[in-house]
Image (spheres, rainbow, N blue to C red):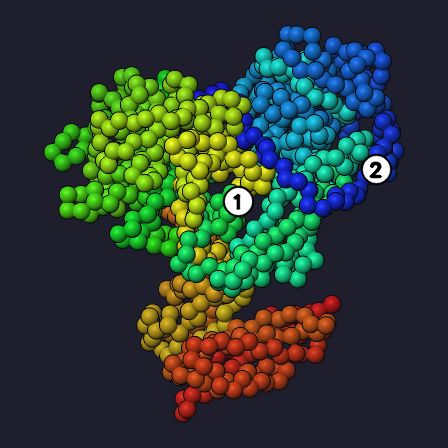
């Protein structure tokens, strides 16, 4: 559960994971290309950029400060004629000037460190603005609170700023830290490397956008403008209004515009400033490509690691084909049981126009059987204060690699809740081996836009004492198609007992226990966090304990409340459990005594019962990912790697960084940070659960992760008058071909048709819509009356915003005959229109088919029962009007006909 106000001031996110600590030796000589070094002094803003780079825009430019001074300079003139005033360097000294930059020394805000005072009122009254800076950060800034620059004063109420702590961000607020609107990058910055950071505040579009090196990395809605910062009497570079340390690093240029720059203009700024330190990017590119590790491919199509977006790939090896995106590789895998194949790819790191490349060894593993262990699925949610993201998301591993993950459904949610609070947080994925059923269980809480309470008890006070004690539940047998949402109440009293006085139930997990019941049948032991009260009003003092109960199927009918599992006398939350060779291990978050994530074990068979003795193994787990703050990580998730004694612990770095990995090969020895520079996971992947898959399950998930239908119009079918709905459905195509995500080609999936609009009592043609069964057809959004998405909107109903749909036409009134389905597309070949006709024999026996078009006919010959054949008919014309294709079929003495329309088309 992630309710941040109880942890830290909401303006301050926790630190990201430490960077990978292992760099492999180079497998081949580096090849470096790109920019050459430029002179130290930048070009005039009105002239072309330095060293031939594009010139930064000048329209709307209020200030440009070039930190190319030397000697004892304390003033940096504004290069813009008629612009705002000059800047003043506080703590200036000759050794602070490099000739192309100013060194900012860091240190205490009240000390003698170096920072830059900007003119007052630089953006006073403006409705839009762009602020750009060319900077190099010291490693200490990645874990220290800092303001890279600030438009405001020494007040902590109103400010517009950028920071490089954790993942870099830009933010604006007019109400203090709790009201900050953040646009945050999904990736951290490297120390000792020059970056162009640009903040664009667009008052017309009501948007705050953040760019790194000319590339947009974050965007968030806001109605705030620079004019809302009414006190701009202490604008600064390197100094915060908070008692944070001064910024430590270097600054080369700083510009302020009174308008929102377009994306190409931001790129021009980055390109121009890159020329100032071009030689340094050669080393940066070399450093990145030097960390690229050898690859192991165990899937026919794989997304390759990007190392923070810097690396692309190419191939000259016939066994490997890299797509045009430079990231997707198709491999020819050896057959099952054969020896692995040795191959090679070329990795190219690009840093602001400078590239370095080297050959990387690749091992292509043979295929595995459908029932062998292969791949992992993860359920999680996303923390996004600017968008209602408290829903269910699914990721799948890249092949059998537990360190690299691809979001399913294009990164969009797959399930949502319209019950209770309408929020879904802290989901967990578990499995009942007796029934073959998977379950997602999750907290019923909406933080962003939900009920925040009233009076003197709001937000965390309200949620923890008066919030929902129900858990959200979905179930599935294939991890693709999920049941309707249901809820059950964990505060239901045990048989003959009294209902427990619980505050909100949150962060639920469950462990399957074989033989839990006296009759030998199994059950889930469920554990979650709640405050426990002694009064029905829940107004007395309390703290979070970990509670437990048992169920076989997460329904109220089988639920049995157990009691307290963990009571440390202070807030304890987020327990996760793993078992191995008779020992049960658990990781729990301590929120009261500073232990953070702590790790224990027991050999007790019934480990959930009171009186169980637990042995402490480790404390402060993963604190390094949060700058040494043990409270900055929570929501742990543990899973075992296939085929080896290696376990992963994913720890959630709050509030928005998300999971970062730890690893062990000995559960009794504790956890260590995973040094893996190619670890890959989407930002803000938070607090969930992971299960292992078989190859069959992995392929089924991948084959259901579709981006669209190959052909949306599946043609027409004929049914006799009076046919019932089942007969209409039976006449329609059973499947549709879909395009798969991540360049994995196509797959065929079932179609569920809506035939409610077909009136078989009235002859005519009716268009029907079918939903293809994919990951995206889950009910992942909801809406209430009048289109409301308020948590208490009446008439809420779920729907899918990402379903893949197809259409067909049902012609009513035709005589019963041989059923056939026809679909037709147009395409251009050598400047001529070609009709591609897809004929499916829905008859129970082979048929002879003849395709008729305005441009000639084609005889297909025998077409087996249920088979589909595609026929290309060349029109020999550069353009054709709309028309119809008819397909006549014969099966003995029976005949049938299908048809499909095509739109007008033109080539060239």
Q: Secondary structure at mark 1?
A: strand
Q: Nearer the viewer, residue 366 or 289?
A: 366
> Are the residues tagged 1 and 2 within 8 Å (C-beta)?
no
Q: Nearer the viewer, residue 749 or 900?
A: 749
Q: Nearer the viewer, residue 80 or 664?
A: 664
Give the residue drawn at x 53%, y 81%: 886
Give the residue drawn at x 61%, y 44%: 293
| Quadrant containing the N terminus in the rendered view | top left
Image x and y of residue 716, in percent:
47, 74
Reading the image, the residue beneath label 2 is: 36
Give the residue drawn at x 26%, y 26%: 613
Asked whether residue 57 is in view, the answer is no
Give the residue drawn at x 67%, y 73%: 833
Q: Residues within 10 Å of mark 1 (few under 14, many from 20)?
A: some
Residue 68 versus residue 893 in the image, above or below: above
Using residue 421 as the reference point, say whether residue 274 is left or right of it.
right
Residue 757 versus residue 499 in the image, above or below: below
Reading the image, the residue beneath label 1 is: 404
The quadrant in which residue 218 appears is: top right
| Quadrant containing the C terminus in the rendered view | bottom right
Q: Among all residues in the image, which is located at the extreme bottom?
A: 893
Image x and y of residue 213, in percent:
70, 35
Q: Secondary structure at mark 2?
A: loop
Q: Nearer the viewer, residue 771 or 8?
A: 8
Q: Among all residues in the image, which is located at the extreme left?
A: 496
Image x and y of residue 197, in percent:
69, 30
Q: Of the residues under marks 1 and 2, which one precedes in the sequence?
A: 2
Label 1 to label 2, Cα distance in Å? 35 Å
């Amino acid at each position: 559960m992630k309710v941040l106000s109880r942890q830290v001031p909401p303006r301050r996110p926790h630190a990201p994971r430490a960077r990978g600590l292992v760099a492999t030796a180079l497998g081949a000589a580096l090849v470096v290309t790109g920019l050459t070094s430029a002179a130290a002094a930048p070009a005039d803003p009105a002239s072309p950029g330095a060293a031939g780079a594009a010139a930064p825009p000048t329209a709307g430019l209020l200030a440009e400060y070039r930190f190319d001074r030397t000697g004892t300079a304390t003033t940096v003139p504004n290069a813009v004629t008629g612009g705002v005033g000059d800047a003043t360097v506080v703590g200036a000294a000759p050794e602070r000037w490099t000739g192309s930059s100013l060194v900012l020394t860091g240190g205490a805000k009240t000390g003698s460190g170096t920072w830059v005072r900007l003119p007052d009122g630089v953006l006073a009254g403006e409705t839009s603005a762009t602020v750009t800076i060319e900077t190099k950060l010291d490693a200490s800034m990645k874990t220290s609170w800092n303001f890279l620059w600030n438009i405001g004063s020494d007040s902590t109420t109103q400010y517009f700023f950028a920071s490089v702590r954790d993942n870099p961000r830009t933010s604006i607020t007019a109400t203090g830290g709790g009201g900050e609107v953040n646009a945050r990058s999904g990736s951290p910055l490297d120390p000792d490397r020059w970056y162009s950071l640009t903040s664009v505040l667009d008052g017309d579009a009501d948007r705050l956008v953040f760019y790194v090196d000319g590339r947009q990395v974050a965007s968030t809605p806001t109605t705030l403008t620079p004019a809302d910062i009414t006190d701009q009497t202490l604008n600064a570079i390197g100094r915060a209004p908070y008692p944070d340390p001064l910024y430590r690093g270097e600054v080369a240029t700083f510009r302020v515009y009174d308008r929102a720059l377009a994306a190409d203009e931001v790129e021009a700024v980055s390109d121009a400033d890159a020329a100032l330190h071009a030689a340094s990017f050669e080393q940066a590119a070399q450093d990145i490509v030097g960390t690229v590790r050898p690859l192991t491919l165990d899937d026919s199509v794989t997304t390759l690691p990007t190392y923070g977006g810097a690396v692309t790939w190419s191939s000259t090896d016939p066994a490997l084909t890299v797509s045009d995106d430079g990231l997707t590789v198709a491999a020819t895998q050896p057959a099952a049981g054969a020896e692995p194949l040795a191959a090679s790819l070329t990795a190219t790191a690009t840093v602001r126009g400078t590239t370095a490349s080297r050959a990387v060894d690749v091992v292509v593993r043979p295929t595995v059987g459908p029932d062998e262990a292969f791949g992992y699925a993860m359920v999680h949610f996303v923390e996004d204060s600017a968008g209602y993201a408290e829903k269910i998301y699914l990721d799948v591993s890249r092949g059998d690699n537990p360190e690299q993950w691809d979001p399913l459904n294009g990164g969009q949610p797959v399930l949502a809740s319209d019950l209770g609070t309408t929020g879904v947080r802290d989901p967990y994925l578990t499995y009942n081996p007796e029934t073959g059923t998977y379950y997602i269980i999750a907290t019923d809480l909406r933080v962003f836009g939900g009920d925040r309470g009233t009076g003197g008890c709001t937000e965390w006070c309200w949620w923890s004492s008066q919030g929902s004690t129900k858990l959200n539940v979905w179930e599935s047998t294939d991890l693709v198609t999920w049941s309707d949402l249901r809820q059950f109440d964990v505060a239901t009293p045990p048989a003959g007992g009294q209902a427990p006085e619980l505050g909100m139930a949150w962060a639920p997990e469950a462990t399957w226990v074989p033989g839990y019941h006296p009759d030998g049948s199994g059950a889930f032991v469920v554990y979650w966090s709640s405050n426990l009260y002694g009064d029905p009003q829940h107004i007395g003092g309390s703290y979070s304990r970990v509670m437990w109960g048992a169920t076989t199927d997460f329904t109220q009918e089988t639920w049995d409340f157990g009691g307290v599992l963990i009571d440390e006398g202070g807030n304890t939350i987020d327990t996760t459990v793993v078992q191995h060779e008779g020992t049960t291990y658990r990781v729990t978050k301590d929120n009261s005594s500073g232990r953070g994530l702590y790790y224990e074990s027991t050999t007790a068979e019934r480990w959930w019962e009171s009186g169980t003795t637990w042995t402490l193994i480790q404390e402060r787990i993963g604190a390094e990912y949060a700058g040494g703050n043990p409270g900055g990580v929570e929501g742990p998730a543990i899973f075992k790697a296939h085929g080896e004694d290696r376990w992963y612990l994913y720890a959630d770095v709050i509030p928005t960084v998300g999971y970062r990995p730890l690893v062990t090969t000995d559960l009794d020895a504790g956890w260590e940070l995973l040094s893996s520079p190619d670890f890959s996971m989407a930002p803000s992947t938070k607090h969930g659960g992971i299960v292992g898959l078989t190859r069959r399950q992995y392929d089924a998930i991948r084959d259901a992760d579709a981006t669209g239908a190959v052909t949306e119009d599946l043609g027409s079918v004929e049914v006799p008058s009076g046919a019932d709905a089942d007969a209409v459905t039976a006449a329609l195509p059973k499947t549709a071909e879909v395009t798969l995500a991540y360049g994995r080609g196509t797959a065929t999936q079932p179609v569920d048709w809506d035939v409610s609009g077909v009136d078989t009592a009235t002859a005519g043609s009716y268009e029907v819509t079918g939903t293809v069964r994919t990951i995206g057809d889950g009910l992942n959004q909801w809406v209430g009356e009048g289109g409301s998405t308020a948590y208490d909107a009446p008439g809420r109903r779920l729907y899918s915003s990402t379903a893949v749909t197809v259409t067909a036409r049902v012609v009513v009134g035709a005589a019963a005959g041989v059923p056939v389905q026809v679909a037709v597309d147009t395409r251009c070949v050598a400047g001529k229109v070609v009709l591609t006709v897809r004929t499916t024999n829905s008859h129970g026996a082979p048929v002879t088919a003849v395709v008729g078009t305005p441009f000639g006919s084609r005889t297909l010959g025998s077409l087996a029962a249920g088979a589909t054949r595609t026929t290309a008919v060349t029109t020999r014309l550069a353009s054709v009007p709309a028309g119809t294709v008819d397909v006549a079929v014969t099966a003995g003495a029976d005949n049938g006909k299908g048809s499909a329309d095509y739109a007008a088309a033109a080539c060239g």
